[in-house]
């Protein structure tokens, strides 16, 4: 099998990511890389036996709780991984003793993470230890891990403790209150509640031992129910420990502890759970795989990314969406951005439209939050949050707090100005509809979003009587290096124009196909035929800064007057241009964090009208690419450049 090697001790094959050496300096990075999940939760690739300063985390969709500064965050849920092994009193851990061999493998095809280690204890006893784990894709409330221990050169006692850890932190912040815990038929259970959002969580677990006689005992430190067993082993003898875990929250059931206990009693075999999980993955890949022949690295890269999307897409919940960092870590606090609709959704629309619909329905359920945001700013309709969580209210932090005591706080303007999100969501809805013909969903959910966000634009767009044109002032476009006095950002204006054109089309479609629904929405959203005409007028007269003599689209009014910059003068570098020039320095120069005009051209590639044609594309490509901080700006950038690069 062909394989490709990376500098991070990683080997890629078509389906597997294999880490060949453990380097503690890469601990957190690799925890993210080796995340597993099943669309209900994600669990980082931390070690079962623990490691100093590990960021072990299990994040469950929709389990948010209040936190200072960023308002709300996805909560690190009780840790189901813990399984410690000690031999004659020496605990196995990778910062102790000696690692004789090491391999960690993520099997994308089967959704299984495994680890194989030969370890010598500080006193010189050698053992082989193998772990594997999965979050069942066949039943999202089921998690399972297997540990196999084989002593190589000693007779002795192996003590195993399998715990649930009820007080995991979000990097120093604890969200949990303990309610209760206990034992039932030698299985343990834990009942916890988030401090502010009052979401209750029930987790239950049992340990199945094979390969030797085992006597199980339960200990109960509050917050840490544990099953323990001590096994007598001899050289070459392998004992297998299967830890099976179930989890529910009050987001779905009334009694999460009972639900997790009931489910647990039905689960008697690790192998059976594994085979239904593997079969579910086989089906998922049948719907989603992309085959690239002759380039292992590209093949692996595409599958790895599809895997990330598949493990983070809610299958059974339309009140949550995929956060910018998925369920793989604490970045962006589990908040949902335009990333989902614009970058992630197309994959689901064309492979598993039901999942795309779940993600879009989340925006329907959060409409009231968007309405509260609009009314807070003095506007009408639905103004979607730049960062959204459980309610749809704006949760972008207002300030970024510096680490140094004398530095100034930094105002984050995206919450107020990065308003293109209110056109991005309608954009995604339209393409979902085009691909699926799901008229019923559009009628019952999508239309209301498109129309109410259209109502917002009526109150946000300004008429410039001097120039006789509509304008949108004080925004932030896709490029976040420019956030002061950005007027008539081409990306925003054109997306809004496109949105309003579709709002008119959908309004007319409703009136002719579903007149009752049209009447209902007219009353609910206050849409009148006059407003429909206003949308049309705005479509016709919303200004976009485009010079037909050069074919250049100006990123925003005045952008070409900013000081120009040659990014090659700053090479080699390992920081973003904003870090080098400062926030103000970058904002005064023609340097982009990520594609803005080219992003627009990408999204408008199917539009027959302005601005897409080859010549415009070439001119704008030549202008903007050298000015874009593609390596250190935003990770959303390279894909867009790559797409155009192929044309
Ligand atoms: C990017 C945004 C993106 C956000 C979350 C920012 O750095 O500029 O476009 O939505 O990260 O991924």
Image (spheres, grey):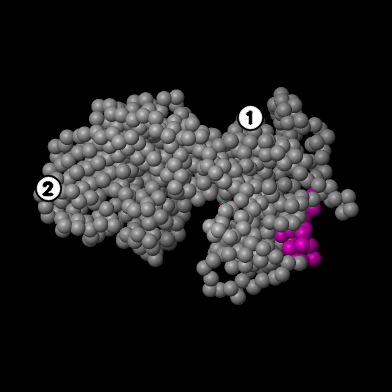
Task: Choose between 370 and 296: the one closer to the eye.
Answer: 370
The answer to whether mark 2 is within 8 Å of ligand 1 is no
Q: Which residue is mark 2?
A: 156
* N-term-proximal mark, 2 vs 1: 2
Q: Residue at x 22, y 38 (%)?
A: 228
Q: Is residue 504 visible?
A: yes
User: Is 13 contained in the magenta span?
Assistant: no
Q: For this view, does 568 lie left or right of residue 41?
A: right
Q: CA distance from mark 2 to mark 1?
A: 66 Å
Q: Residue at x 71, y 62 (%)?
A: 616
Indicate the quadrant where residue 515 lies.
top right
Residue 580 point in image, percent of width and height: 59, 68
Q: Secondary structure at mark 2?
A: strand
Q: For this view, does 363 lie left or right of residue 352?
A: right
Q: Which residue is mark 1?
A: 444
Q: Residues within 10 Å of mark 2 (few under 14, many from 20)?
A: some
**Residue found at the far front of this picture:** 406
Q: Residues within 10 Å of mark 1 (few under 14, many from 20)?
A: few
User: Is 544 contained in the magenta span?
Assistant: yes
**Residue found at the far bottom of this picture:** 569
Q: Nearer the viewer, mark 2 or mark 1?
A: 2
Q: Are dots 2 and 1 in contact, CB under 8 Å?
A: no
Is residue 250 positioned above or below 2 on the image? above
Q: Secondary structure at mark 1?
A: helix
Q: For this view, does 539 lie left or right of residue 330?
A: right
Quadrant location of the N terminus in the rendered image: bottom left
Q: Residue at x 25, y 27 (%)?
A: 185
Task: Choose between 506 and 226: the one closer to the eye.
Answer: 226
Q: Is residue 107 visible?
A: no
Magenta segment: 540-560
């Amino acid at each position: 099998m062909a394989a490709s090697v990376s500098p991070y001790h990683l080997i890629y094959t078509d389906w597997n990511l294999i880490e060949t050496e453990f380097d503690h300096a890469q601990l957190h990075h690799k925890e993210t890389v080796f995340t597993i999940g099943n669309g209900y939760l994600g669990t980082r690739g931390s070690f079962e036996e623990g490691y100093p300063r590990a960021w072990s985390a299990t994040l469950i969709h929709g389990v948010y709780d209040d936190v200072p500064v960023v308002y709300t965050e996805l909560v690190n849920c009780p840790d189901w991984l813990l399984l410690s092994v000690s031999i004659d009193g020496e605990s196995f851990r990778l910062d102790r003793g000696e690692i004789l061999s090491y391999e960690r493998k993520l099997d994308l095809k089967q959704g299984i993470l495994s680890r194989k280690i030969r370890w010598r204890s500080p006193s010189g006893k050698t053992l082989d230890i193998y772990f594997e784990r999965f979050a069942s894709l066949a039943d999202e409330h089921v998690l399972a891990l297997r540990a196999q221990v084989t002593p190589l050169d000693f007779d002795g006692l192996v003590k195993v403790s399998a715990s649930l850890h009820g007080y995991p932190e979000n990097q120093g912040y604890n969200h949990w209150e303990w309610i209760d815990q206990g034992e039932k038929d030698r299985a343990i259970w834990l009942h916890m509640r988030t401090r502010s959002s009052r979401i209750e969580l029930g987790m239950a677990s049992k340990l199945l031992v094979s390969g030797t006689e085992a006597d199980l005992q339960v200990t109960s430190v509050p917050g840490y129910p544990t099953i323990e067993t001590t096994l007598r082993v001899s050289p070459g003898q392998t004992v297998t420990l299967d830890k099976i875990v179930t989890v529910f929250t009050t987001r779905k059931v009334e009694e999460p502890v009972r639900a997790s206990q009931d489910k647990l009693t039905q689960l008697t075999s690790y192998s059976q759970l594994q085979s239904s999980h593997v079969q579910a993955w086989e089906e998922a890949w049948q719907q989603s795989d992309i085959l690239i022949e002759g380039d292992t690295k590209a093949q692996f890269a595409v599958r790895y990314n599809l895997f990330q999307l598949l493990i983070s897409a809610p299958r059974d919940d339309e009140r949550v969406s995929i956060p910018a960092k998925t369920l793989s870590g604490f970045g962006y606090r589990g908040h949902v951005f335009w990333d989902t609709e614009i970058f992630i959704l197309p994959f689901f629309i064309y492979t598993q439209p039901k999942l795309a619909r779940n993600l879009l329905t989340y925006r329907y359920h959060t409409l009231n939050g968007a309405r509260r945001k609009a009314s807070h700013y003095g506007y009408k309709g639905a103004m979607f949050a730049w960062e959204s969580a459980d309610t749809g209210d704006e949760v972008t932090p207002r300030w970024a707090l510096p680490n140094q005591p004398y530095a100034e706080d930094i105002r984050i303007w995206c919450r107020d100005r990065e308003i293109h999100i209110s056109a991005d969501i309608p954009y995604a809805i339209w393409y979902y509809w085009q691909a699926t013909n799901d008229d019923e969903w559009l009628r019952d959910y999508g239309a209301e979003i498109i129309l109410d966000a259209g109502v917002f634009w009526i109150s946000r767009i300004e008429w410039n009587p001097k120039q006789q044109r509509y304008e949108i002032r004080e925004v932030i476009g896709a490029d976040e290096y420019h956030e002061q006095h950005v007027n008539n950002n081409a990306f925003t204006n054109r997306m809004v124009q496109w949105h309003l054109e579709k709002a008119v089309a959908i309004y007319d479609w409703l009136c002719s196909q579903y007149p009752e629904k049209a009447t209902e929405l007219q009353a609910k959203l206050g849409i009148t035929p006059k407003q429909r005409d206003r949308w049309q007028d705005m479509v016709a007269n919303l200004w976009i800064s485009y010079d037909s003599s050069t074919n250049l689209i100006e990123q925003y009014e005045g952008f070409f007057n900013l000081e120009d910059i040659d990014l090659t003068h700053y090479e080699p570098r390992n920081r973003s241009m904003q870090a080098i020039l400062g926030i103000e320095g970058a904002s005064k120069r023609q340097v982009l964090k990520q594609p803005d005009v080219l992003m627009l051209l990408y999204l408008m590639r199917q539009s027959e009208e302005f601005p897409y044609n080859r010549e415009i594309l070439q001119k704008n490509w030549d202008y903007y690419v050298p000015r874009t901080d593609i390596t250190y700006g935003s990770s959303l950038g390279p894909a867009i450049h790559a797409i155009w690069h192929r044309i």
